Image (tube, helix red, strand yellow):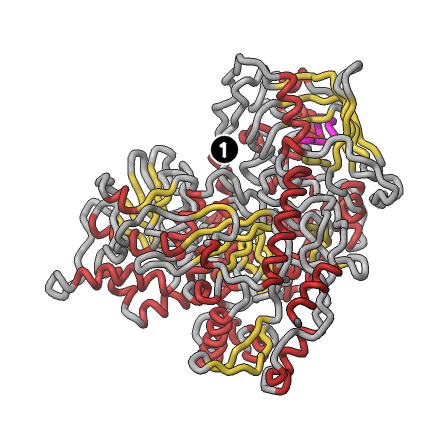
Amino acid sequence: MAMSSRVARLLGRRKLTQTSTLSLRTVTQCTAPRTARRTFCTTLARKDTPEVFPSMREGPAAGFLSTLQQQQTKIPQTLTEKIVQRHAVGIAQGKVLQSGDYVTLQPNRCMTHDNTWPVALKFMSIGASKINDADQIVMTLDHDVQNKSEKNLKKYSQIEEFAKNQGVVFYPAGRGIGHQIMVEEGYAWPGTLAVASDSHSNMYGGIGCLGTPVVRTDAASIWATGRTWWQIPPVAKVNLIGIMPQGVTGKDVIVALAGLFNNDEVLNHAIEFTGSDETLRSIPVDDRLAIANMTTEWGALTGLFPIDSILHGWLRSKATDAALYKNSDYKDHHGQQYLHERIDKLFTATGIVGQQSGPIFQPALAADKGAVYAKELYLDLTTLSPYVSGPNSVKVATPLSELESQDIQINKAYLVSCTNSRASDLAAAAKVFKDAATHNNGEIPKIPAHVNFYIAAASIPEQRAAEEQGDWQALLAAGAKPLPSGCGPCIGLGTGLLEPGEVGISASNRNFKGRMGSPEAKAYLASPEVVAASALSGKISGPGWYKAPVGYTGVRRGEGDGVIEEERMMTIEDMLEKVIRQAEETIESVENASADKQSMNPPSTGSESLTEILPGFPERIGGEIVFCDADNINTDGIYPGKYTYQDDVPREKMAEVCMENYDPSFGSIAKSGDILVSGFNFGCGSSREQAATAILAKGIPLVVAGSFGNIFSRNSINNALMGVEVPKLANRLREVFSSSTPPASQQNMQEPDKNRESLDSPPPGQVVQPQQAKQLTRRTGWTLEWDVRRSTVNVQEGKDGKKWSVKVGELPPNVQEIIALGGLESWVRKEIGGTV
C-alpha cells in the first residue's frame, strides 16, 4: 500500500516544466540532449518522510534519514552543475544553474606554470598591480625545467620574484608538475572548482574537484578580480560497469574510451564518471587521476569522478601523512590542506556500521537522482584488455595483443608526465623488471642497447616514495635515464625527444604527430607496465599479467547505462522513472536529436522568455552571409602562424591575412559587416587569440558555425567577437551551394614551430571539406539577423527566397558587458577602477 501511494504521488506531481534556453554551444550529437524547451521533469521534490521500517527511524541511522526529509531540490542537478552553483557569483536568488548557462565564476584555485610570466605581462598591461586574492593563486615551474639558457632562467627568476612580491605560493623548477602539485598539496579539493592555464586541468576531477582549463586572459582576469566567465557545458555520463581484470589499468580505460568512442561523442562536454559501489571501489585514486587527465584528449572540458568511500580513504591517508611528515625538507603546504576536520565536511555519517567496512559515510555532495545528462555512454570494464593508443593519434586504440603480434620495434620509452608517473606507476613499471630478475639470477635485467628509457616522477614526493620502496633504484638499475620532475619529453622539450624515423612508447597523455619530437616519428601511449615491458623487450609488448578469458569477444561498450536488462534490479518507482525518461527522450529526439532537426520557425508563445539587454548593446546583429564551407578550420587557417609571435602586426595587416591559410581569396570576397558562417568545430587548434582579433579587424562582427572549438569560443568573447552555433544553417547552406568538384588547396596548413611556446595548445584539427564542396568562400546573397533579446536567428535565403528562424542560446547580460566593453581585459580594467 505504501508503494502504491508513492507511485500515486510521483504521478500526481509530474508536471510540464520549461528550463532555460540552450547556450551558444548547442549540443549537436546528443543521444538524449537537454533541450531549450523540456516537456517533462524526471524527478520531483520529495518532501515527505522516506519509506523505511519504524526501527530504522529509532536506530543509529535516524539522524541521517531525517536529513533526507529536507532535500527539496526543485530541479535536479548533475554534480558538475552543483559545483558550479557553489562558485558562481551574481546569479539571481533561487536560480538553479544548468548546462548552457553563462556564469561569472570565482574558482577556488587558479594555477599557472611556465606561462606565468606572459600572464603577468597581460595582468600588468591591464593596469593591475596587486593580485586580488593571493590565496587563490598557485604558481609552478614545470614545463621547460631542463632548459638552462639565460633567457629561460631569466624568465623563471622573474616569475619567482613576481610570486614573492605578490605573496603567492610558488613551486620552483624540479619540485613537480603543476597538476600533481595541485592534487598532492590539497589545492584541488573535492567539491570545489579549480582552473589552470593548461589543458590538463581536467585531472583534478579524479578527486572530485571540477577542473577545467582557461586561457591566459582568463588567468589574468582571475588574478585581478578573482573572477572570469564560463559557460556550463553539456554533461555526459560515462557509466563504468564491472571490475578491471588483472593487468588492466586506468590508463587502459581512458585509452580505450578515447579510441573506441572516437567520433567526438564527448567533444566540449563535461564528463561525470559513474558506476556501482563495487565498480568504483575497484578504481584507485591514482587510476582515476589518469583517466580524468586524459579526458582532455578525449575532447572533454572536464572529467569528474564522484566523491565516495575510496576518495574518503585516500583523503584520510593524506591527512595522516601530512601530520606525520609536516616538517619535510622540501617545500610543501599539504599539512595546511589535508586536515581531518576539513575532510569531515565532505561526508555525512549515516550512523550505520558495516560488519566489515566499519562506519558508513554518505558524500555531502553528489548528483541528484533524475539529473539530466546530454548523453550517456558505458564501458564494461570486465571485457577490457590492455590497450595501446596510436601511432600518432589518441583516436586510434588497439588491443595490446594485436600489436604484440606485429613485432613493432621501439627506440625510446617514456615514464613521464602528470598522467602516469606517480609512485604507484613507478612501482608497476619496476615490478616488470623485478619479476624478470627472478629469471636472471636475481639481478635486474638491462634494457637493450638500442632502447633509451626515460623516467621522471610527477613530483619530488612521488619520487621519494618510489625510492623508499626501491622502485626508483630498480628502474635505474635496468638502465633507465632519470630526468628532473617536470613535463619534458611529453611536450617536446628537453632531453630524449623522438628523432625522424624513430618509434616511441610513452605513459604520457598526447601522441599527436610532432608532439614528442620529430613529425616523422611514431608515438604510442600505454600503461606504465606496458611501457616498461616494451623497454625491456625492445618492442611493443606487455608483462603478461593479463589473461584473456575463454570465449573473449572484445570490449562491450555503447550508449545508455549498459546494464543488461535481465540483471537490472528496479523498484516500481525506478520503472516509472524509466518509462517517463524514455517518453522524454522520444519527444526530445523529435525536437532536437541532431543538428538536422534543429527547430525552424519555432512557435511563439505568450510566455516567451526575453533576454535582458544592457543599455547600448545592440538588440539585433545582421549582415550578408559569407560561407566558408569546411569543418575543422583551425586557428592557423584563420590567422597564419608566421604572424602569431609578432607583437607589432598592425590591424590593417591582420585584416589582410585573415583566413588566408584557409583560402587566399577570402580577403577579396569578404567585406566589412558580413556575417561569417562555417561548418563544424570552427577554430580548433592552438590557443592564439589573434584568430578572434583578426576576424574583428576584417570588420566581421559575428561568426556563426555548426560548432566551435572551445578555446576559440573563449578567446572570441574575451576579445569581443560574438559567435553563435546554428548547425541547421551550416547544413542548409551545404544543401543549396555544394557541387561535385571539391578543391584541395587548403589541406596543407601547419602549426608554427614556435606554437609549442603556448605550452597548452591542443592538436590542430584536420581541415575537412564536404565531398561536394564547390568553393572555399562564397558570397551567398543570403542575410542573417540575430535577435539577441529573443535568442533567435532569422535567415532570408536570398531576395526572393524563403525566410525561416531558429532558436539559439541566450547571450546573458554578464557576457554582453564583456563584449560591450571591448573584451575581458577592458572588463577587468573597469572592475579594478582603471581606465577602460
Left or right: 714 as drawn, with respect to 525:
right
Say if residue 130 shows up in the picture.
no
Vertical position of residue 87 compared to residue 123: above or below? below
The quadrant in which the N terminus is found is bottom right
Residue 10 percent coordinates (x, y): 70, 62
Residue 752 percent coordinates (x, y): 49, 33
| Residue nearer the viewer, 200 or 277 | 277
Residue 702 belongs to the span the image colors magenta: yes
| Residue nearer the viewer, 213 or 574 | 574
Say if residue 175 shows up in the picture.
yes
The residue depicted at 58 percent of the width and 20 percent of the height is: 663
Vertical position of residue 424 compared to residue 523: above or below? below
Residue 653: which quarter of the image? top right
The stretch in magenta equals 697-706
Density class for disc 1 (Cα within 10 Å; few <14, some 14-19, many ≥20) is: some
The residue depicted at 42 percent of the width and 43 percent of the height is: 259
Looking at numbered disc 1 in the image, what kind of residue is underneath it? Answer: Pro
Left or right: 540 as drawn, with respect to 64:
left
The residue depicted at 75 percent of the width and 50 percent of the height is: 19
Name the residue tied to disc 1. 752
Residue 109 belongs to the span the image colors magenta: no
Q: Residue furthest front?
A: 1
